């Protein structure tokens, strides 16, 4: 069975992804520095595709597979931003 995203919404601290199998994942925005630093309009400009989520203006791509595995931003930029944030 292939699991895909159906919709995405945001609150102040989290991204909520509704999946095709009925689950909803809550993911901290801190896992994705580009989304954390984006304004609400930029976050809402998401393209939901079969394999994941894409934000053209933010140069951000998030796979559903990665979300299900509990992975945050895997880029050097993401790791560097995470290291700068207070615990």
Image (cartoon, grey):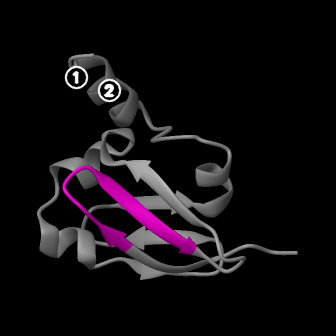
Counting the numbered discs, the total is 2
Q: Is residue 47 left or right of residue 12?
A: right
Q: Which mark is residue 74?
A: none
Label 2 secondary element: helix
Q: Residue at x 22, y 19 (%)?
A: 84
- The residue segment tinted magenta is 9-18
Residue position marked by numbered label 1 in the rendering: 85
Residue 48: image location, x then y, percent? 49, 81
Q: Position of residue 6 (x, y in %)?
A: 55, 83
| 33 to the left or right of 54 | left
Q: Position of residue 86 (x, y in %)?
A: 21, 17
The residue at the far right in this view is: 1
Would you say 49 lies left or right of 22 here?
A: left
| Magenta stretch encompasses residue 13 | yes
User: Which is more toward the observer, 24 or 1?
Assistant: 24
Q: Above or below — where is 20 with respect to 15?
A: below
Task: Please say whether residue 45 is one of the residues in the magenta stretch.
Answer: no
Give coordinates of residue 70: x percent, y percent: 60, 41
Instruction: Name the residue: 49% across, 68% down.
Output: 17
Image quarter of residue 75: top left
Q: Is residue 28 above or below residue 6?
A: above
What residue is shown with label 2?
82
Position of 33 compared to 19: left or right?
A: left
Quarter of the figure with the N terminus: bottom right
Q: CA distance from mark 1 to mark 2?
A: 5 Å
Going 42% across and 64% down the picture, which residue do you hit?
Answer: 16
The residue at the point 11 percent across, 63 percent down is: 39
Q: Is residue 78 above or below residue 10?
A: above
Question: In the rendered view of the protein, which quadrant contains the C terminus?
Answer: top left
Contact between marks 1 and 2 (CB within 8 A): the answer is yes
């Amino acid at each position: 069975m292939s699991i895909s995203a159906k919709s995405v919404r945001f609150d102040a601290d989290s991204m909520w992804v509704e999946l095709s199998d009925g689950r909803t994942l809550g993911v901290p925005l801190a896992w994705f520095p580009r989304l954390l630093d984006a304004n609400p309009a930029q976050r809402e400009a998401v393209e939901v595709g079969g394999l994941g989520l894409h934000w053209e203006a933010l140069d951000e791509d998030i796979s559903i597979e990665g979300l299900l595995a509990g992975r945050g931003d895997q880029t050097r930029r993401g790791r560097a931003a995470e290291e700068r944030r207070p615990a």
